[in-house]
Amino acid sequence: MAGIPLTLACGDYEIIRALKEGIVKPDGIDLTVLTAMDPSPRHWRFLRKQEYDMAEVSCSGYLAARDQGLPFRALPVFLHRRFRHGFIYTNSKAGITSPKDLIGRRVGSKAFLFTAALWLRGILEHEYGVPHKSIEWVTELDEDVEFTPPPDLKISRLPHTSSNVESENMLVEGRLDALISPDLLKPLLAGDPRVGRLFPNYKEEEQRYYARTGIFPIMHVLGIREEIVQKYPWVPVNMYAAFNQSKAIAMKRMLNPRIVPLAWYREAWEEQEAILGADPWEYGLGDRNRKNLNTLVGYSREQGLISRTPTLDELFLDVSQGRKREEYRI
């Protein structure tokens, strides 16, 4: 008997390859995996239009959606994590040499709800003494979920007539002092001397941050339409098992340094393992992930993106199959 047809939109990651290629088949589910779109339109199309049954989605957007009572739930599957210290860019002539130099400045962000921006605003405030309300924020895109900014937040949005790289142009030209972006900037990659990083030694800064906090920032969660959960309550558990199986296959494959065209790939893998442990991409709500997510929820509440502080058990579906029954081994 064929399984129920469901769609999953997510990034084209090694850890979901087995799902995408049909090597792993979630029990009872005929899964269509869509990986061709960029993150921003995927988040919009899921949270605004519910075009997919499941989607990798911005954690910040998901928190705002749940806070507003929108019909979404989430699995504790975290397909995208990234340290973000290397994604604060500055205009080289703005005189910004330390985080506190951002106070009183005009800083761009693709959107206010982007999880990368949420993490960085929280890190700047709590790790470096830069209050998020001390900055004038300039955003470029419509939010994944509309929200009403706190009245004392200095924030404006560029007009729709601006280009999709307007904030990068503004940084280069000095109309912005700094820019938070989820991506590497083209001017930086091109070696434009007018653009630099707030933390030139960002890798060392990120390692110090991890040593202090134990946090490898979670960017995205796995959203699912509430209608699916109500109609098929077994789907989240079966999908969670399939994601774990796919990740286990990927990690075993990645142990072979021949599959990646990098001269010192194996050394990089061993360095990561020594710093972050054997499974930095762990799923579920273990202690490390709870600290990670509770920190982000706290930042979201502090910055006025949500009206209350939900518990993680409210935010994430129970995917337990009983103690010692969840781990997949290959």
Image (tube, helix red, strand yellow):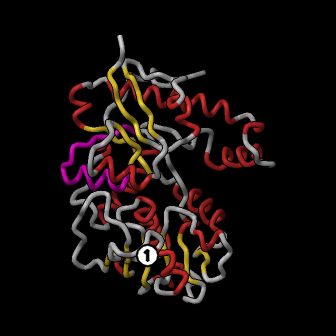
What quarter of the picture does the C terminus occupy?
Answer: top right
Find the magenta span and give its range.
58-76
**Of 218 and 4, the residue lying toward us:** 4
What residue do we see at 55% from left, 41% from top? 13
Residue 145 figure quarter: bottom left
What residue do we see at 39% from left, 53% from top? 41
One can see residue 288 in this view: no
In the orientation shown, which residue stands out farthest toward the left? 69
Instruction: Rate crowding at label 1 as few (under 14), some (14 to 19) or many (20 or more) other CA atoms within 10 Å.
Output: many
Q: Position of residue 209 (x, y in %)?
A: 56, 61
Apparent side of residue 301 relative to residue 182 in the rendered image (left or right) = left
Q: Position of residue 231 (x, y in %)?
A: 22, 26
Instruction: Tell me the kind of residue under disc 1.
Output: Gly
Apparent side of residue 216 relative to residue 277 in the rendered image (left or right) = left
Q: Is residue 70 magenta?
A: yes
What residue do we see at 21% from left, 29% from top? 230
Determine the secondary structure under disc 1. strand
Q: Position of residue 264 (x, y in %)?
A: 79, 48
**Of 207 and 82, the residue lying toward us:** 82
**74 vs 113: above or below:** above
The residue that mark 1 highlights is: 108
